[in-house]
Image (tube, helix red, strand yellow):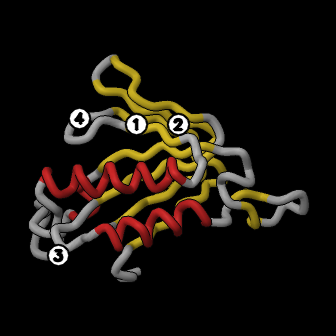
């Protein structure tokens, strides 16, 4: 499982003209699921996201997690995080999980974040979405449950 985590001043996601999720200060999480992922991968990434200390404390140091910064989380599914372009210019998505499996793990991840007491908004799984954000910093962190990076 992979995530691109961005510290944001605000973020929103829409399907067509319908707003499906919106947050102020917090984290935008673009989440990709691989065909080999399990709930253990989702647990690992959820724990990382929940505990990621990338918000500034009173001394201006990145030392606070999203909940300590009174922020929210917006999670958007993004299978293209498993796009492989090592053999050409057209991405292969062979490593991405099939939709049924990916949907279950995506929903599991969202519930883990919510069960931690965080407000968690979402996009809409397997839909074309428009994501808007104001990256704060900018701060962008890449996470991978297989620890590939």
- Residue 126 position within the rendered picture, expressed as x and y whole percent measured from the top left: 20, 41
Residue at position x 17%, y 57% from top? 101
Q: Are marks 1 and 3 in contact (CB under 8 Å)?
A: no
Q: Which quadrant is the C terminus positioned in?
A: bottom left
Residue at position x 14%, y 51% from top? 99
Residue at position x 13%, y 51% from top? 100
Q: Which residue is the site of mark 1?
A: 131
Spatial separation of the CA atoms under disc 4 and disc 3: 25 Å
Say which mark, if any, is on residue 11.
2
Q: Are marks 2 and 4 in contact (CB under 8 Å)?
A: no
Q: Secondary structure at mark 3?
A: loop
Q: Which quadrant is the N terminus positioned in?
A: bottom left
Q: Which residue is the site of mark 3?
A: 86
- Residue 60 position within the rendered picture, expressed as x and y whole percent measured from the top left: 84, 60
Give the vertical position of 88 relative to 11 (above or below).
below
Q: Quadrant of residue 123?
A: top left
Closer to viewer: mark 1 or mark 3: 1
Q: Residue furthest front?
A: 115
Depth check: 22 or 88 in front?
A: 22
Give the vertical position of 54 relative to 106 (above or below).
below
Say which mark, if any, is on residue 128.
4
Q: Are marks 1 and 2 in contact (CB under 8 Å)?
A: yes
Q: Secondary structure at mark 2?
A: strand
- Mark before the other along the chain sequence, 1 or 3: 3
- Residue 38 position within the rendered picture, expressed as x and y whole percent measured from the top left: 26, 70
Spatial separation of the CA atoms under disc 2 and disc 4: 17 Å
Residue at position x 9%, y 67% from top? 94
- Mark before the other along the chain sequence, 4 or 3: 3
Closer to viewer: mark 3 or mark 2: 2
Name the side, left or right, on which 147 lies relative to 38. right
Give the vertical position of 12 relative to 142 (above or below).
above
């Amino acid at each position: 499982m992979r995530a691109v985590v961005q510290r944001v001043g605000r973020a929103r996601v829409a399907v067509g003209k319908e707003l499906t999720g919106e947050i102020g200060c917090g984290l935008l999480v673009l989440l990709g699921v691989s065909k080999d992922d399990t709930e253990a991968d989702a647990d690992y990434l959820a724990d990382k996201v929940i505990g990621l200390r990338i918000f500034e404390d009173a001394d201006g140091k990145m030392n606070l997690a999203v909940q300590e910064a009174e922020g929210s989380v917006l999670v958007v599914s993004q299978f293209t995080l498993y796009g492989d372009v090592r053999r050409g210019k057209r991405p292969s998505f062979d490593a991405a999980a099939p939709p049924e499996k990916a949907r279950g793990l995506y929903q599991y991840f969202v519930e883990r974040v919510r069960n931690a007491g965080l407000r968690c908004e979402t996009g809409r799984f397997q839909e074309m979405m428009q994501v808007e954000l104001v990256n704060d910093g900018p701060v962008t962190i890449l996470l991978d449950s297989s620890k590939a990076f």
